[in-house]
Amino acid sequence: MVSDDTPLWLFADQLGPATYGGEHAHRDVLLVEAASALSKRRYHRQKLHLVMSALRHAAVDLGDRATLIKADSYTDALERFARPVLVYEPTSFAAEAFVHRLKERGLVADVLPTPTFALSRKDFGDWAGDRTRFRMEDFYRDQRRRFDVLMEGKDPVGSRWNYDEDNREPPPKKQRSLDVPAPYRPREDDIDAEVRRDLDAMKLDTVGADGPRLFAVTPAEAKRALARFIEHRLPTFGRYEDAIMGDDWAMSHSLLSVPLNLGVLHPLDAVDAAERAYRDGSAPLAAVEGFIRQILGWREYMWHLYWHFGPDYTDNNELSARGKLPDWWVDLDADAVTAACLHDALEGVRDRGWTHHIQRLMVLGSHALQRGYRPDDLTEWFATAFVDGFRWVMPTNVVGMSQHADGGLLATKPYTSGGAYLNKMSDHCSGCRYDPKKRLGDDACPFTAGYWSFVHRHQEMLAKNNRTQRMVSSMNRLSDLDAVLEQEAHRRRF
């Protein structure tokens, strides 16, 4: 029985005003720090810090409304709390099943719809209908119409839905960074110091380096991070969103994925702020549209497809990739890697638990695709080694987009490239021991040679796709293909 004084139990990714405000602003709030959840997987050290810091800051911000219980498990905490609770739909299949078991035991009074995304799960189900093929562009345009974002009546502002072509510039030449104002950096406080001491005492098996907290974990911090991005960084975001610079890890990216995924920043607040920047003339349309597409389009799309495709989606392995993740990859041993682009990406994961989307897709993901690493292992790695990698985030991003392991259900082609793309879109290749133009020899680029090895291995599938047929015909013209394949079959160092 749900009464007007039934408390809310909030998970660590539900910590914003959308969950505890509005019609529920009168309710007490239960927060749980469960030791079993922290030790269940080999997480990045900084990810655990962010989650614990977010929970403890929420308890302080909510004051007398909040009860924070530190327990061995969520069940233990609920039994100690001794009151049935309301809970929002969790953000993973496993957590959802767990909540329903708790409801059967009477520990949970009712389960409410998730309020931390723009579109409800029911509305997405109506949109998906009986579709068997999905295109993000269709979903994105309907999102724009539904929420009246960057619209002039029934038409998109500027008469174009998509400004991708304007947002693919390589990094500026003769610069080591974009030379834009730095992103918002939160100030660590006594809570963060306590979290660090407690994590040290727990002696958990983690990966990655400890380090200063780089991401917002409270609604107030998220508001400041968003404001700084909109005012100082959004204008240059679009042009260079696909570029990589070795000495500029953040470039013009928003760094809002953590507060979004913790629930302390609502996606529509980010979208509204970006649109206002366009409307008042402080940011160009291409940059604003590109950012809004990331939030209202891609992020929402990944969330809903996670639920729509079901819990067995990560079992997909249409390319029969069976390779084990190397130890240097699992342990984030960037110093064991020579290729500059791969070293830099892995170093970013080690030192910050974060890299931007092109490093994830076209460096880490492309390498894994070329080398045939298991997509389910890769999904788990991304979900635990990245500070923004919650359980719902990675399956469709990795299995579908990055590894093409669902056979094209999500993406129309595999996303991989040779060294030429990386040479164009990054500043890594000039200082790398490998030559992006070479596919054979001691200095042959592992991405260039690995590309042809991948094409050869999957040529039958690629030849049937009109977007990838040219890859196969180009491979068939290589005079040294056999030597390249032999070289890559024995490559162990990158």
Image (cartoon, rainbow, N blue to C red):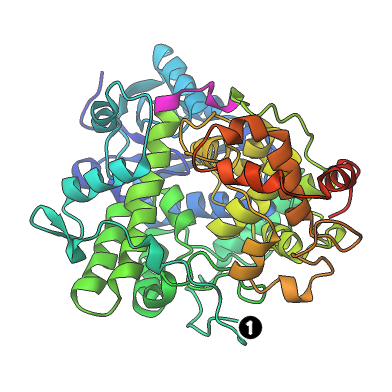
The residue closer to the viewer here, 334 or 153, is 153
User: Going by the picture, which residue comes out furthest to the top?
Assistant: 104
Image quarter for residue 324? top right
The residue closer to the viewer here, 391 or 403, is 403
Residue that appears at 50% across and 41% down: 393
Image quarter for residue 100? top left
Image quarter where the C terminus lies is bottom right
In the rendered image, residue 220 lying in the magenta stretch gets the answer no
Q: Is residue 60 left or right of residue 451?
A: left
Q: Whole-percent x and y of residue 111?
A: 33, 25
What stretch of residues is rendered in magenta? Answer: 308-314
Q: Is residue 48 left or right of residue 1?
A: right
Q: Which residue is mark 1?
A: 176
SS assignment at label 1 = loop
Q: Callout 1 environment at 10 Å: few (<14), some (14 to 19), or many (20+)? A: few
Q: Confirm whether residue 379 shows in the render.
A: yes
Q: Whole-percent x and y of residue 488?
A: 85, 45
Residue type, label 1: Arg
Residue that appears at 70% across and 46% down: 475
Relative vertical location of residue 89 with respect to residue 205 in this rendering, above or below: above
Q: Confirm whether residue 203 shows in the render.
A: no
In the rendered image, residue 313 lying in the magenta stretch gets the answer yes
The residue closer to the viewer here, 30 or 312, is 312
Q: Whole-percent x and y of residue 478?
A: 76, 50
Image quarter where the N terminus lies is top left
The residue closer to the viewer here, 3 or 228, is 228
Residue that appears at 26% across and 73% down: 277
Q: Is residue 287 left or right of residue 340?
A: left
Q: Whole-percent x and y of residue 70?
A: 57, 39
